[in-house]
Amino acid sequence: MLDIPEEQEKSKNNPSRAYVRDAKAMAATPADVMEYPTSYVFIVDMPGISHSEIKVHVEDENVLVVCGERKREKEKDEKEGVKYVRMERRVGKFMRKFC
Amino acid sequence: MLDIPEEQEKSKNNPSRAYVRDAKAMAATPADVMEYPTSYVFIVDMPGISHSEIKVHVEDENVLVVCGERKREKEKDEKEGVKYVRMERRVGKFMRKFC
């Protein structure tokens, strides 16, 4: 039996966890892709993420990756005595890959 | 057998169609509701709809309704020779009711 320390198991390098997280992020991020005569336009829904927090890069030479993350301001919320009555909005990663 | 003219069947007044449309709109519109010591804050995801296009009103005295609609610019798209390669983003109504 393998005895994997808990810390290592929780590591961000664990491929299956990363895979699941990315799959969920992609499922939560709808996109339209439009073909113009001389260009492509990508429109991606990432509600609540400001332009400056959205990262765009190219992976493996031909994969366009658009991603961002939405967080709750826990400290601020706790300080101001906020109680969540309803919590439906996605927290975490939004991501799409186009190739 | 009832012979309902097609036009009448397609009417916007048909309650079941309106009900289905609204149920879909509500399912597509996640919201957080936060209780502050002296107020409530409603955060509703309506990606791609500008502030000025979001309507807020009170229904039946105690139901807060937030709604908006997202449309594709068909005429503009057709004029510019656009071809949709992918079309995942919701078109239509976004809505939430709080009571």
Image (cartoon, coloured by chain):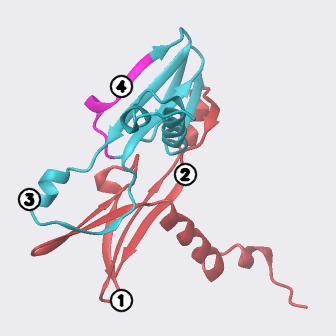
Chain colours: A cyan, B red
As drawn, the residue found furthest toward the top would be A61
Quick check: B44 above or below B74? below
Residue occupied by mark 3: A79
Residue A1 position (above or below residue A98): below
Q: Dot 1: what SS?
A: loop
Q: Residue B89's image quarter?
A: top right
Note whether residue B14 is visible: no
Structural distance between the alpha carbons of marks 2 and 4: 25 Å
> In this rendering, do the residues under marks 1 and 4 share a single chain?
no
Image quadrant in which the N terminus of chain B is located: bottom right
**Chain under label 4?**
A
Left or right: B36, with A45 as reference point:
left
Q: Disc 1 and disc 4: Cα gap in Å?
A: 44 Å
**Comes first in the chain, label 3 or label 4:** 4
Crowding near the residue tagged with mark 1, few <14, some 14–19, many ≥20 C-alpha atoms within 10 Å: few
Do marks 3 and 4 both belong to one polypeptide chain? yes
Instruction: Determine which residue is flagged by label 4.
Output: A55
Pointer 2 and pointer 4: residues touching (CB < 8 Å)?
no
Name the amino acid, label 3: Lys
Tell me if label 2 and label 1 are in contact, CB under 8 Å: no
Q: Is mark 3 on a helix, strand or loop?
A: helix
Q: Position of residue B56 (x, y in %)?
A: 31, 69
| Amino acid on which the number 4 mark rests in the picture | Lys
Q: Nearer the viewer, residue A43 or B69?
A: A43
Residue highlighted by disc 2: B91
Q: In which quarter of the image is residue A6?
A: top left
Q: Where is residue A43 in the image (x, y as percent from the top left)?
A: 48, 34
Q: How crowded is mark 4: few (under 14 residues within 10 Å), some or many (20 or more)?
A: few
User: Which residues are drawn in magenta?
Assistant: A48-57
